[in-house]
Amino acid sequence: MRTGLLVATWVVLFAVLIRSLDVAFAWWKGDLAQPAFGDWVWIVLLPVWVFLYVRYFSVFRPGCTACEARDDEPLGPRGV
């Protein structure tokens, strides 16, 4: 149950992050001549989505052990 909720949260976060990036790049390139209120909401929330991704889902999150070497794994061909 918890894994399913985590995956669903990641998918939603990824979707809103992509939408925010799409609107922000369109605004940056000048494609949004007069941004609407909704466009500004996406632009302003972009740092929030990035923070949530980095804090809870990326390898930079606190306590992430994805890159640590494990003692129980065999060493490489040179013993490194």
Image (tube, rainbow, N blue to C red):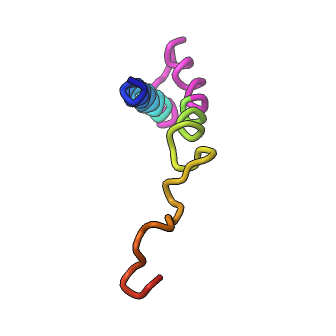
Question: Residue 28 placed where, x, y %?
Answer: 52, 35
Location of residue 50 (image quadrant): top right
As drawn, is 48 to the left or to the right of 58?
Answer: right
Q: Residue at x 47, y 82 (%)?
A: 80
Which region is colored magenta? 26-48
User: Which residue is situated farthest in the right direction here?
Assistant: 62
Q: Residue at x 60, y 24 (%)?
A: 44
Can you see residue 26? no
Residue in the foreground of this view, choosing between 15 and 38: 15
Question: Residue 49 placed where, x, y %?
Answer: 54, 30
User: Which residue is situated farthest in the top direction here?
Assistant: 37
**Image height of 36 relative to 53, above or below:** above
Residue in the foreground of this view, choosing between 65 and 27: 65
Can you see residue 13? yes
Question: Residue 39 placed where, x, y %?
Answer: 50, 18
Residue in the foreground of this view, choosing between 37 and 61: 61
Total numbered circles: 0
Question: Residue 45 placed where, x, y %?
Answer: 57, 24
Report the magenta stretch's main SS.
helix
Q: Which quarter of the image is occupied by the N terminus?
A: top left
As drawn, is 27 to the left or to the right of 1?
Answer: right
Q: Residue at x 55, y 17 (%)?
A: 41
Q: Is residue 55 magenta?
A: no
Q: Residue at x 51, y 66 (%)?
A: 69
Q: Is residue 44 magenta?
A: yes
Location of residue 6 (image quadrant): top left
User: Which residue is situated farthest in the front direction here?
Assistant: 72
**Image height of 70 relative to 76, above or below:** above
